[in-house]
Image (cartoon, coloured by chain):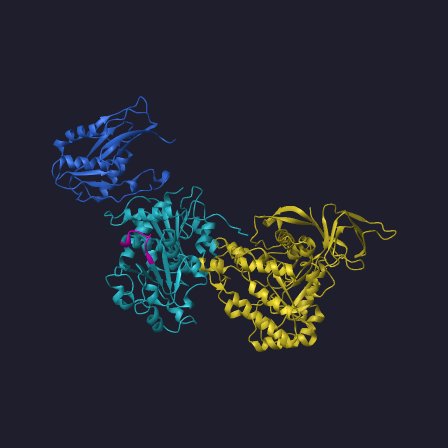
Chain colours: A blue, B cyan, C yellow
Amino acid sequence: MPGNPSPDAEQLLKALIEQMRPAVAPETGLIGIHTGGVWVAERLHQALKPAIPFAALDVSYYRDDYEARGLRRDVKRSEIPFEVEGRDLILVDDVLYTGRTIRAALNELFDYGRPASVRLATLVDRGGRQLPIAAQFVGARVDVEPSISIDLTRGVDGRLAFVLNRRAS
Amino acid sequence: MWLNPSNPQLDRKGQLHHLLTLEGLPAEILWQILDTAKSFVGVKVKKVPLLRGRSVFNVFFEPSTRTRTTFEIAAKRLSADVINLNVAVSSQSKGESLLDTVDNLSAMHADMFVVRHGESGAPHFIARHVAPDIHVINAGDGRHSHPTQGLLDMYTIRHYKKDFSNLRVAIVGDVLHSRVARSQIHALTTLGCPEIRVIGPKTLLPAHVEQLGVQVYHDMRQGLKDVDVVTMLRLQNERMQGSLLPSAQEFYKYYGLTDDKLAVAKSDAIVLHPGPMNRGVEIDSSVADGKQSVILPQVTFGIAIRMAVMSIMAGNK
Amino acid sequence: MKIHIKGGRLIDPKSGVDAKRDVYIAAGRIVAIGEPPSGYTANRVIDAAGLVVCPGLVDLAARLREPGFEYMATLESEMEAAIAGGVTSLACPPDTDPPLDEPGLVEMLKFRAKNLNQARVYPVGALTQGLKGEHLTEMAELVDAGCVAFSQADAPFADSEVFYHALQYAATFGFPVWLRPQDPALARHGVAHDGQVATRFGLPGIPVCAETVALSAILILARATGARVHLARLSSAEGVEMVRQAKRQGLAITCDVAIHHAHLTEMDIGYFDSNSRLDPPLRSQRDRDALRAGLADGTVDALCSDHTPVDEDVKQLPFAEAEAGATGLELLLPLTLKWAEESKAPLLAALARITSEAARVLNIDAGHLTPGHAADICVFDAGRYWKVEPEALKSQGKNTPYIGLELKGRVRYTLVDGQVVYEAK
């Protein structure tokens, strides 16, 4: 998109790792939200090396647009390989926008148990919130038109990159 | 002349609106259901909120506690409200017509009907007459179809064999009266299984069954040779009363699955049975409980399949 | 009343005429064809320009549902349907409730029908009392009351001996016997042709051998007893071939096919459409093609409507539970025209199957246009399309696989005994 250079995902990831380093203890649960958030969580997990494995959450069954848009085609099973009850958690997503995905993720998490705390990390915060949700760890704040979507991709080499797409209206 | 062209299961966008039979469903929809079911298998939470506020009516014109229960569990795990109607007893006996029953149930603002009926095609009939926003799932109709059973069988086969493209599958026993057999055959051919065999005496095989894309065997040992999957069909006791078979004993001798007959199949062949089993009639206990039997996992997968079907359909507008 | 039917294309299969001819009617009879008799002045001129003028149709099987099934249809509604379909003579099978097994019932039916002043009704009497297949009816008495033939409709004989005796007795008096070739035991549980569709849909099948087993018994007993047998509603290729062979060997039999079976196949069950639940069942494409070939070469003598009005309560049900049958009186002509067009059969030959040939089977003086004979005439527009929908049908039975579809050929005028009994609006 001319005039809208894509943010550099690998750079932002580095920044995010540094922000989060003091906050991640060995027992902190990292939970990536499908699909981009899981890639980010995986990289955060490699860099921050908590003692427990990271989790992957697919919020399809908790989304509030199911009525309007139906079930997504490629639903994945949520895998949380640790006890949620009483744990400090960090939800990880690639792009924070309306906040609705995070709402769905919180609802899903609470079906697994009552965590001690939940914080939120995101590579990009593009504003536009429709719910009272804020991220504690943010790679960068970007400003793009509502008609543009920011999508994270992962190359065969594992490198993350953002692409900007015009939304299908 | 062919008078009736369009597929009544799909909406204008080609999405699944009713699940009445697996025949004629695009492979893409079958894969979507199988993939979605996978996301439900082994989920730790008790229920997800997907169908919160929706009501699922189990409308059973023919009693079947087992099937009804699995649909009920599936719907409840999706947070739907479940209403069980044993129509066989309540209204039909009072002389109410099926059409009146359907109108009445539609007026109760159901979102989904799960229908079991003794007559082939009854769910098609119901789907034609319900309000357009109601989804109908066939939970077994006569000899015609039992699509969620067929799907859970596909799930089971895929779970153990990964791929359909080089499988040899045998379906054994009373194919004539079996909706499970028909559903399996349609699903297997759609998913690309290259070789399907049906095995049974001529009295229990329907006319021109080979036109469904299967090979016919009357000798079980020949039919089971080198197969990857064996599906044993339930033999209803009432089949013994007519002129189809002389006795359960003779059937068991020639078409019952025993260890020595299973030995001619591949060594890693799996054994399926839709349940409930008649041990000693179509299957020997040592096979049913043996290491090649996947009959219990079938039941587990059945709930995930029904959750997948409901959550896909309820989201299709 | 003198009526002049002017400018139409006259098709009379019996005389082989297919030409533009006028018809002159007086005192209920045709008085001249072509040129008017001297001094003829018509009271009414029917402009038939662009229309076909043919004998009133003769239908070998129309259930009028009286007595006993008035909730499905009444004599009034079905007689209206007959003339709206151009049918001026019809035979009705004895499967009423009670069955037509007593002279009083037959007389009452004839009387009620006659008072309606519409089509001529020819009752087919029950061959056995109550159609139970056990005791013979008083056939001679029934003939005196107006029966033209005897039949079991779709009911079975108790055993072969009753069957044998019924044919012997009927043969004694030369009464025709009309038989449905269908083995009751082989057809007992079935609801559809035992072919690929029944297999796919899990519908209990009626095998072709249900027809051929019964047919061979009928042919053997017809030979043995000398009975005049008419075979009602053939459905299979093998059946047609057996009749062809029997006729070739000189056996004096006739047979008919229901008009639906000349068009539809098992595929037309669609997705369990109970409107396509018929008896005999719709069979395979190969069978349908053989029925058409039989119609073309004369093995099959006549087409009939097999008119069976069925009400919604027993039709709007899952396929196997639905009652068999389709409404047909008003579709007989358009579906015959459709068959002619698709088979490239000349109109003259096609119309013979529902006029002169059907009258020959019935052994009545009808189905032809001859000066000096009754003026039973159908005037129709062969090119006119109309949509088969409930409002378009006079019959109380709206049950037809063709519902919602368009057919070509619409009756404009129907005359019985020189009176215009039906006129399209």
Spot the residue most to the top.
A3
Is residue C154 found left or right of B275 in the rendered image? right
Locate residue C11, reporting x and y percent. 73, 53
Would residue C378 be seen by someone viewing this image from the given angle? Answer: yes
Residue B162 lies within the magenta run? yes
Locate residue C336, reporting x and y percent. 64, 54
C213 or B49: nearer the viewer: C213
Would residue A132 be seen by someone viewing this image from the given angle? Answer: no
A165 or A94: nearer the viewer: A165
B191 or C310: nearer the viewer: B191
Name the quarter where the C terminus of chain B is drawn. top left
Q: Is residue C118 above or below residue C392?
A: below
Is residue A8 found left or right of C180 in the rendered image? left
Locate residue C293, reporting x and y percent. 61, 59
Locate residue C98, reporting x and y percent. 61, 68
| Corner quadrant of residue B249 | bottom left
Q: Main secondary structure of the magenta part?
A: loop
| Corner quadrant of residue B123 | bottom left
Query: Residue sitting at 56 percent across and 76 percent down?
Result: C160
- The stretch in magenta equals B160-168
Residue C254 lies within the magenta run? no
